[in-house]
Amino acid sequence: MDDNSCNGGSDSIDWNTDDEQEIADILSPSTVSINTNGTVTSEFGESSSSSNHHSMLAHFIKMGFSKAMVTKVIAKHGENNIDAILDTLLTCSADDDINHQEQELNVPCLQPEINFESDFSDLDSNFSDEDSNESFEKDDPLVCLIDMGYSCEEASAAISRCGKDSPLSDLIDFISAAHISKEADASSYTNALQSYSHPLPKNKKRKSVMKKKNREKKPKTKTNNEDDDDDALHLPNPMIGFGVPHEQFHVAHRTLPDSAIGPPFFYYENVALTPKGVWNTIKRFLYEIEPEFVDSKFFCAANRKRGYIHNLPIDNRFSIQPLPPLTIFEALPGTKKWWPAWDKREQLNCILTCVGSAQLTDRIRSALESCKGEPSEQVKKYVIGQCKKWNMVWTGKTRVAPLEPDEIELIMGYPIYHTRGASRMERYKGLGNAFQVDTVAYHLSVLKKLYPHGVNVLSLFSGIGGAEVALHRLGIPMKNVVSVEKSEVCQNILQGWWEQTNQKGNLIHLSEVQEVTVDKLQEWIGCFGGFDLVIGGSPCNNLAGGNRRTRDGLEGEHSSLFYDYFRILDGVKSIMGRN
């Protein structure tokens, strides 16, 4: 890959490593072999003597597993249970791939994958060496969850529901979705948001203010009369919000507070599964409007669980045409001939800014080719786990590959080659951070009758232009668009699309939300006559479940930019209310 460079952390990654030990070495007859019937044989025999113990330890260490991990697994399962030992070592190493992508671990048979670092990624994998060591020592999910601050009851319930072999991020997401308690009142921030003459403090200052407030907060003692469920934010199942095409859930009436009634209309998006209290806080700032939680699997061939808070009408929505493919085979028909019967996936997982490496696909190929006939259950489990994590598809009998950028563009609802011209890394990064166009367009479709002559849009955190593409595909003219996006690559992508689609309106670029001051807003509103839509989704990488190191919620350095979204929106509403 010619474009394998990354802003930050790239020095720690060996982009051209070629000394990885293939997973086939793990399965070689000279050490431990996995038979086609799923059984495991070993030269260790059934002796439990000290010499055999050291021999077993040495063999597994030679295979690339750390001494700490091997010792712990042998102690857990006993020296005679080779099946369980190998399965646990493979599982632990595979599960750690996604959490240690930017480190060089002492596990040559299961090297970490490359993660393209992103300010808006669903996955933050900038882990320290200390985090890496902890992952080997604390492989018990119950211990990990308790150490992260969750109660024993919450952790036990999550493991019971999701399964003990579930990735830690899934367990965290289950707990967050099942019981999200209220955070401390953010009144100190409200005072800071009253003045629109100056932008909010920089991220580090904002983060320190919120942390100081939390330190001063006294712990609350729950009484017997308090119901835990009162503080819970329940996600719908299925996650269809106020309705999706072909599966309508009609809401006869939705009452909005007077302060939220548009115009201007506003639309805010972020990940659905966040740390405790995040959506309650977002809701409090955005005029107490209930979030609409929607999974984009109802609009495309990939899962993408998102929450939306908006004041748009919810009746008479419609889908953009043509309707997008909803399954992998519809989106990527060339994969069907190679798809094994034991891979039951019909849709992909959430599109991330990450991509599986060539080394990983080689390991999977070697593991499958080492099996005679049907792969064993252990090999299947390993392959399916990696394919799900990295959204890999079948391109041959024993070959899988990550999605190409053009294929992701199709799934995410963008025109083909929308991001072409950017580096391969930046294309993955931009698409992983983007709106799923068909989902957003379904919600925005109500604007077509309201604004037949076009809209003025304030687009915050624009990315590669998902909002603009959605409005264009709906046939809604854009008279003026102020796009705020710090990535120059994304700015160029949006500018190129704007020109190629012969847009007639004006496109104005800004790099930082802090540049959007009250003076700027007054200037634009005076020139345009007001904004019809304020749209955007602030960075989520301090919110997403895959982030185990800096999942700081809205206090996080990046995700605290939500408060800029509110500051700007409230400024627009205030100025337009006076005019």
Image: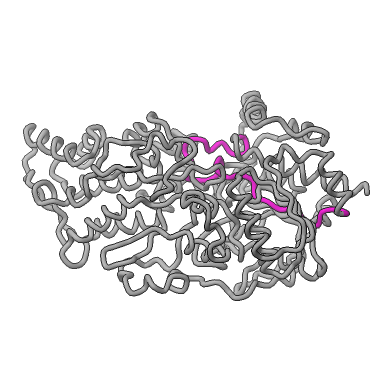
Residue 142, picture quadrant: top left
Q: Residue at x 71, y 35 (%)?
A: 186
Would residue 548 be counted in the magenta stretch?
yes
Query: Eyeballing the image, is 531 above or below 547?
Result: below
Q: Position of residue 54 (x, y in %)?
A: 11, 33
Q: Nearer the viewer, residue 212 or 347?
A: 347
Q: Residue at x 76, y 34 (%)?
A: 199
Would residue 393 be counted in the magenta stretch?
no
Instruction: Read off the magenta span.
Output: 529-555
Q: Position of residue 102 (x, y in %)?
A: 40, 39
Q: Residue at x 37, y 36 (%)?
A: 103
Q: Position of residue 462 (x, y in %)?
A: 65, 51
Q: Relative to 479, is 430 on the left or the right? A: left
Query: Eyeballing the image, is 112 above or below 208?
Result: below
Query: Eyeballing the image, is 97 above or below 477?
Result: above
- Can residue 237 be seen here? The reply is no
Q: Nearer the viewer, residue 426 or 151?
A: 426
Q: Nearer the viewer, residue 392 or 347?
A: 392
